[in-house]
Image (tube, rainbow, N blue to C red):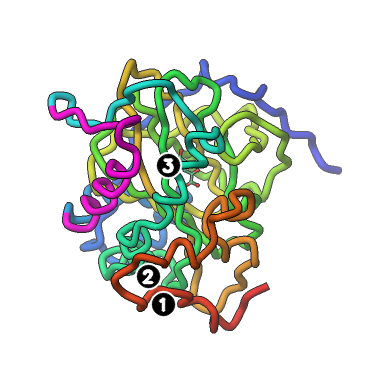
Amino acid sequence: MTVPVAVRPAGDFDAVVYEPLQHSFLTEDAAVLRQRFVRDGYLCFPQGLAESLTAPVLQGMLDVLRPHIVWDHTLGAPVLDGEPFFESDPLWDDLYPHIQALEPLHQLFHSDAVRSMMQAVAGCDPFVYPMKMARIATPQKLGFETPPHQDAHSHHTGPSMAGIWVGLHDAGESSGRLTLLPGSHRRGVRPVHRALGVGGVQCEIYADETTWHVSDVQRGDVIIFHAQTVHRAQPNTDARRVRLSADTRFCPYGAPVFSTNLAPHHGWRIDALDWDFVYRSWDSSGLQYYWKDYPALF
Ligand SMILES: O=C(O)CCC(=O)C(=O)O
């Protein structure tokens, strides 16, 4: 007999407990990192990436987002100058193809530093998904933050896939930090229902899942999470600060990759956003269509 699992009401995070993210370091033994990933469903590498890798992505995003979002030197953060907007709003749709076209956004996830972290988790050569995501979490859009979800559902993948999220600048509690539910990857792929916010679906959270892991972000922080690890963004409650970050997915080389992951992010709904558009001004052709001969596309 299956015992029904009590489910937490959607959006009810008032009674949850927050603990800091467990930190990991590439200098640790590979077996220790693997064990921690299997136990918690994520690894966080604080300031795992040098500024030389993250700064071109941040600068490129700011160049596209100006004058709507600009860097505030006093706050040391991007700030909103004008109306807030959210993924798939008309302004976002106008700007996002130009962010997708940033060569450093794609190069970041193929750098040696990132591939070493992926390898530590995959235990072998990783395949980096073509789809790269850039996140713009503006203030004054409460309720539109990324709802709790599992990437196994959103990306149609098996358990060997993992997500990798990179903080592009320091971001505190008010800026909508990424929050993970440790151990949640061990309870399978969960039912979902429609929700506001990035991705548009929310998965079930069980009533006994009350402890989430979250920390303030520093530029270059990397969080890698299992395909089934439940994660979400906290609301951006700041008056002005915007949170910018980037993420993608990867799997052990040879694992199946579903076709929906082969288009640019939101290319499925923004007409002009295809790979020809993304690549049209790149300096290098090395990463263009690199996945075309991947042996396990479905
Ligand atoms: O940064 C965010 O708000 C969402 C990130 C996310 O859900 C992911 O990387 O899977």
Name the amino acid, label 2. Answer: Gln
Which of the two discs, 1 and 3, sits closer to the camera?
A: 3
- Label 1 CB, ligand 1: below 8 Å? no
Q: Residue at x 32, y 50 (%)?
A: 222
Instruction: Please name the residue that numbered disc 1 is placed on.
Output: 125
Nearer-N-terminus badge (1/3): 1
Specify the label residue 278 is tagged with.
none
Instruction: Please name the residue that numbered disc 2 is placed on.
Output: 119
Q: CA distance from mark 2 to mark 1?
A: 6 Å
Name the amino acid, label 3. Answer: Arg
For the C terminus, the image quarter is bottom right
Above-or-below relation of 89 to 22: above
Magenta stretch in the rendered image: 52-73
Which of the two discs, 3 and 2, sits closer to the camera?
A: 3
Specify the label residue 135 is tagged with.
3
Q: Residue at x 28, y 52 (%)?
A: 57
